[in-house]
Amino acid sequence: MTDLLKARPVQIWWLAVGMGITRPLCALLVLWFAMFPVPTVEAATRLTFDDGLTLVIQDSDFEADTLNGWFLDVAIYRDDRLLANIARVDITSRKNVSNGRIHVDRLEIENFVARDGGKIGKAFLKNFSVKNINDLSYEDLSALPDDFSAGIYALEAHDDDVSIWLDRLETTPFKRDVLPSGQSLISHSGFRFDGFRLKPKQASGNQVSADEIIALTGTDILSLSGAVDQRFFDAGMFTGTKVSMRLVIDKVGALGLTLTGRVQTNILELLLAAPSTDDQAEEELGELLMVNSALDEAVLELRDAGVLDRMMQFGAEEKNISKEAFRAELNQQLFDALGSVFPREGAALANGVSAFLDKGGTLRLSATPDAPVPLISLATFFMVPDAAVQHLKIRAIQSH
């Protein structure tokens, strides 16, 4: 839990823009500072590192005084084996003389082509500061400033089992806030992606086969887009948090989830200050978090874009009955299941879900209590499910 609060998404998205790409490029920047103390234009430069990594740059124009410039036709080798080529690298950065750190305003690559055929049209990192770019660490990344962002575009990758394409992946520019203790908190982060397409090979041993995707979508390619957004905000003695997620699957439907809650601010400060290596302290703070946190609202929305009708048809064919008969059987199982768990409230919940199964459209499942509900008390609702539905105001509503 502590690690999640300590900007774990930063680490995830650093990997997403390609640690294998950015590390040699950043190392290139550092070595360039050391090798060329004056503005330099150089051709066919070869840089070799202790770990067997070699960069060969055909052309460049880099000003060490301003830490700005570009590199053309960069080849990346490891142990004399070609790993990838990059058509262009652009760097805009500045060096802080007082502390030796390097602030990179923008690092961008164009036309990355891996030896195995993988491609990236463009990728960038914007507004980050590190002490030693040749040895990036999580501590550096957790201190990312406001407006840090990253992006990757026109990605393509293939292997024996699957082909993947991605049109765009971008992080939301980071925003930071300061808690009463003076600790810094990433108050806004997130990402979005568009045009992610996955196509399994017919003969592959993947868990998701080409036939299953055809059955699900009517085509042999699974196409997705989505976004995640997280915000922290002031809520008096508490720090509120809102997480929103959305996933759209072409020719299937969409899923949206919004969770809003709060944690007592002094407990959040303890969590942020706790060393991530102390498992016992982390466990104790996790218990404190359960006692001093609350749920404000939870909403799950499902939108059908044709997959329900296909599922009904497949189910009917498996049982050798009509689609209407299969739908009626499924609805009866739904009412029986919810009625056994929620004797008084089950029918109302089942009505909404049943209407969604019959008519499609959108199903909204929500919990909107009148006042924030402590997380520790949610466990007691498992013993009295009907009371949970009433107290949390759980509803299931279908709409078009």
Image: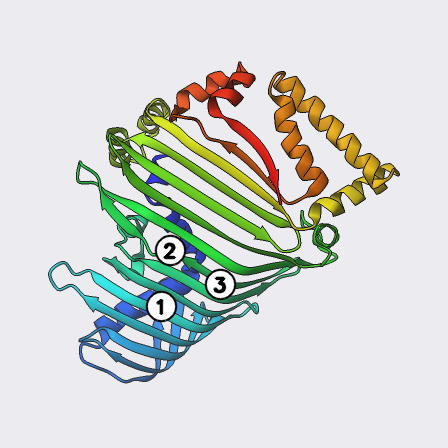
Amino acid bearing label 3: Arg
Asked if the residue under mark 2 is in contact with the one under mark 1, i.e. CB atoms within 8 Å, the reply is: no
Mark 2 burial class by Cα count in 10 Å: few <14, some 14-19, many 20+: some
Pick the residue in front: 346 or 136: 346
Name the residue rendered at 85%, 36% in the picture: 319
**Vertical side of 177 occupied by 392: above or below:** above
Give the residue at mark 2.
172
Q: Provide the residue designation for mark 3.
A: 168
In this orientation, which residue lies closer to the viewer: 393 or 45? 393
Q: Secondary structure at mark 2?
A: loop
| Circle nearer the N terminus (1, 2) | 1
Based on the displayed image, in which of its 4 quarters is residue 98 positioned?
A: bottom left
Discs 3, 1 touching: Cβ within 8 Å: no
Residue 132 horizontal/vertical position (percent): 25, 59
Picture quadrant where residue 308 is located: top right
Query: Is 209 situated left or right of 326 in this image?
Result: left
- Say which residue appears at 45% left-offset and 64% top-offset: 152
Identity of the amino acid at label 2?
A: Thr
Where does label 1 land, which residue? 25
Side of 203 relative to 143 (left or right): right
Q: Nearer the viewer, mark 1 or mark 2?
A: 2
